[in-house]
Amino acid sequence: MKKITLLIFTIIIAVSTLSSKPPKYKRVHEIDKWNRGLFGYNDVWTKEAYKVGKYTYYDLHCWHPGLIACRLQGHLTPPNTNDPTINQLLEKYDDLINDIQNKMIEIAEEEAGNGNLTGTHTKKISNEDLVRLNLLFVFYTKWDYVNEYDGKQTVEFSIIEL
């Protein structure tokens, strides 16, 4: 029975990711990294750049040699999506979302360090809460580095309805 349930769930995820429904929520971080030092950056800051409907865009800037990793720092703007279910999910899973977004930054850094200066990576997350609500968390990153340390990256987090 568990195998059948898993198979059905896998098919639902595969079909849903091919659908053209817009995300129920989307957060995009546009990241600029320039002049990294041996141990990191001196200036690391995030600001909300703009909003377009349900989508929020942030700028993360990491500049000048220093000791700070180029990572998202904790909680951003409190969710206000006019959808109480999405707001609750964003609040409940804020730490998980932040951790995975930072992992996406790390993946790009590792790839750039291995000589892959451009690329993409996607990660999909589901759990009992999301299955019950017929939703899926999708994380996507795209990077374009000019060298091992410097360049641009986009990290997107979306909540997709299955």
Image (cartoon, rainbow, N blue to C red):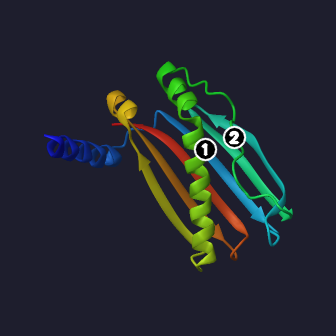
Amino acid at dot 2 = Gly
* Residue 13 relative to residue 72: left or right: left
Q: Quadrant of the N terminus?
A: top left
Mark 2: few/some/many CA within 10 Å (<14, 14-19, 20+)? few
* Residue 6 relative to residue 73: left or right: left
Towards the viewer: 18 or 135: 135
Amino acid at dot 1 = Asn
Q: Is residue 55 above or below residue 143?
A: above
Q: Quadrant of the C terminus?
A: top left
* Residue 110 relative to residue 49: left or right: left
- Give percent across and percent down for residue 82: 55, 20
Name which of mark 2 and mark 1 comes first in the sequence.
Answer: 2
User: What residue lies at 63% left-to-right and 76% top-to-bottom?
Assistant: 113
Q: Which residue is mark 1?
A: 98
User: What residue lies at 50% left-to-right and 21% top-to-bottom?
Assistant: 83
- Cα–Cα span, label 2 and label 1: 7 Å
Q: Are marks 2 and 1 in contact (CB under 8 Å)?
A: yes
Q: Which mark is residue 59?
A: none
* Residue 149 relative to residue 144: left or right: right
Q: Secondary structure at mark 1?
A: helix
- Give percent across and percent down for residue 115: 59, 80
Residue 161 visible from this viewpoint: yes
Q: Which residue is mark 2?
A: 74
User: What residue lies at 86% left-to-right and 63% top-to-bottom?
Assistant: 66
Give residue 9's quadrant in the image. Answer: top left
